[in-house]
Amino acid sequence: MEIPEHGRDLADFAIDFAQQLGATYAEARYEVIIANEFILKNGNPEIGVFDRSLGIGVRVLANGGMGFASTNELTQSSIKETVKFAVDIAKSSAKFREKPIQFSEEKVHEASFEAPYKQLALDVDLDTKMDYIIEIDSLIQKSGAPYRVVFFSDSDVHKYVVTSDGARIAAHVPRIGMFYLLTAVGSNGRMEQGFWQHGGTGGWELLDDWNLVEKIPTLTAKLKKIAEEAQKPPKGTIDYVLGSNVVGLVCHENMGHPSESDRILGREGAQAGESYLTPDMLGTKIGSDVVTIIDDPTLDKSYGWYLYDDEGVKARPRYLMKNGVFEEMLHNRESAFYLGLKSNAGARSSRFDREPIIRMANTYMAPGDYTEEEIFEDIKLGIYMLDHSEWNIDDRRFQSKYVGRTAFLIKDGELTDILVYRPVLETTTPGLLSSIDAVSKTLQFDAATCGKGEPMQGAPVWHGGPTAVRVRNVKTAH
């Protein structure tokens, strides 16, 4: 279902009416959302969600304050009430502000964009979807995981964003996602649990790219082998090689979140924490020369894909760290104005009744020049941590801990088949990023859902990086 002309007219009307009420800036976002979710727990249907919603969210600046309101009653009288409510909030909140909220001036765009697809998941019948989920669940059970949860989702969103300074952006973004959690039991009775998430922007054909029918038996066998064979990690100071799953999580948590300018400027402090980074640290060396971390909304098929953000700003790759230097923060128009910069299209909202806030999209470490063999051959004693079982990080994103799930011993320059049980990488963010001295050539990505905001907004993202990143002289923690 596309944005109807009536919806565009109502969004345009909201902008005009907001200005009549004294708003110095206004934006309206009309969205049509169709989403489906299915969960199987140990083969039994647990829950099904069929979301069919449409509405308009309105955000305004007035007297230096900001207000946001939304409605799913799509009449002109309801839009008037919604806009008036947003303007009243803005004017009331302005009385308590020391500095007025202002937005950066940006190039105005009129554009439309759509994710490429072959077959919309929306057009696939329910029986076909359920048959696929049941097949995946059956594969997991047959491969030796008696305890399992399988989650499948698809969504189709049409969006129209209009601003008082002339932006008009129409978007069509279909997505599908898959999450499964497995618990395998080894012959020794020890259990090992793993979880994987896949997601992308496009159609039903993305399932072919993921090739889960072949992957899942291998994953379950891997968990059983970890439960049966994994040995305690070596003690002392050793080298680590991180797989793309861990590298991507590090990029997301240790560099992505702390680079969000609303977190840096304090807005996130009471909700999710602050940041070890400050604006005057731009240009400061934090990591080694081989570390470049990028957040790029424009990656084809990516879960966090978009070409224009919810403030009408054109998206581009954001270099959070370049050759170890803190290069760029994630901005919306508010934070960009405050710091005398331009927005880099970081404003995203999860749906029409949530305000746009600063979000990551697809955060990853840029590839390097090494083969995996070259990275291993210079290590006397180390651990190759392919993926993680758990992680923890403090509110400023400075102290962090990553616990491995699939990990192998590296000895005398060779990657062995000796499994290591739950190795722990615990260090500071600068300590970790500055200890990286080699990065491999091949990129891989994982999907995730990033939570932020109050009320909570879940944003689809990718994170990833090279398949082998070498970290020197890590003191092992147990």
Image (cartoon, rainbow, N blue to C red):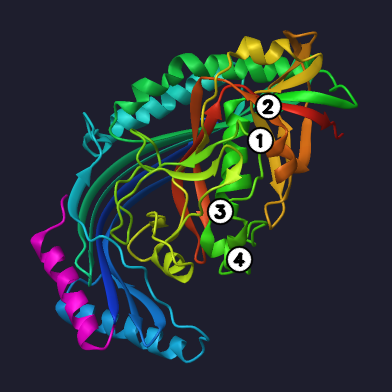
Q: Mark 4 touching mark 2, by CB under 8 A? A: no
The mark lying in front, picked from 4 and 2, is 2
Give the alpha-carbon distance from disc 1 to disc 2, as whole Å. Answer: 7 Å
Q: Residues within 10 Å of mark 4 (few under 14, many from 20)?
A: some
Give the alpha-carbon distance from disc 3 to disc 2, as whole Å. Answer: 23 Å
Numbered badge on residue 271: 4
Give the alpha-carbon distance from disc 4 to disc 3, as whole Å. Answer: 16 Å
Say whether disc 1 or disc 4 marks the residue closer to the N-terminus. 4
Quarter of the image where one finds residue 196: top right
Identify the residue under disc 1.
288
Residue positioned 83% across, 18% down in the render: 231
Q: Residue furthest front?
A: 283
> Which quadrant of the figure contains the C terminus?
top right
The disc labelled 2 sits on which kind of residue? Asp
Q: Residue 257: where, in percent of width, then height?
A: 57, 52
Residue positioned 70% across, 45% down in the render: 429
Say whether disc 4 or disc 3 marks the residue closer to the N-terminus. 3
Give the alpha-carbon distance from disc 1 to disc 3, as whole Å. Answer: 17 Å
- In the rendered structure, the answer to whether residue 1 lies left or right of residue 51 reads left
The mark lying in front, picked from 4 and 3, is 3
Identify the residue under disc 2.
437
Say whether disc 4 or disc 2 marks the residue closer to the N-terminus. 4
Q: Is residue 17 magenta?
A: yes
The disc labelled 3 sits on which kind of residue? Ser
Can residue 319 be seen at all in this image of the molecule?
Answer: yes
- In the rendered structure, the answer to whether residue 223 lies left or right of residue 96 reads right
Tell how many labels: 4
Q: Residue 48: where, in percent of width, then height?
A: 40, 45
Residue positioned 62% across, 39% down in the render: 250
Question: What kind of element bears circle 1?
Answer: loop
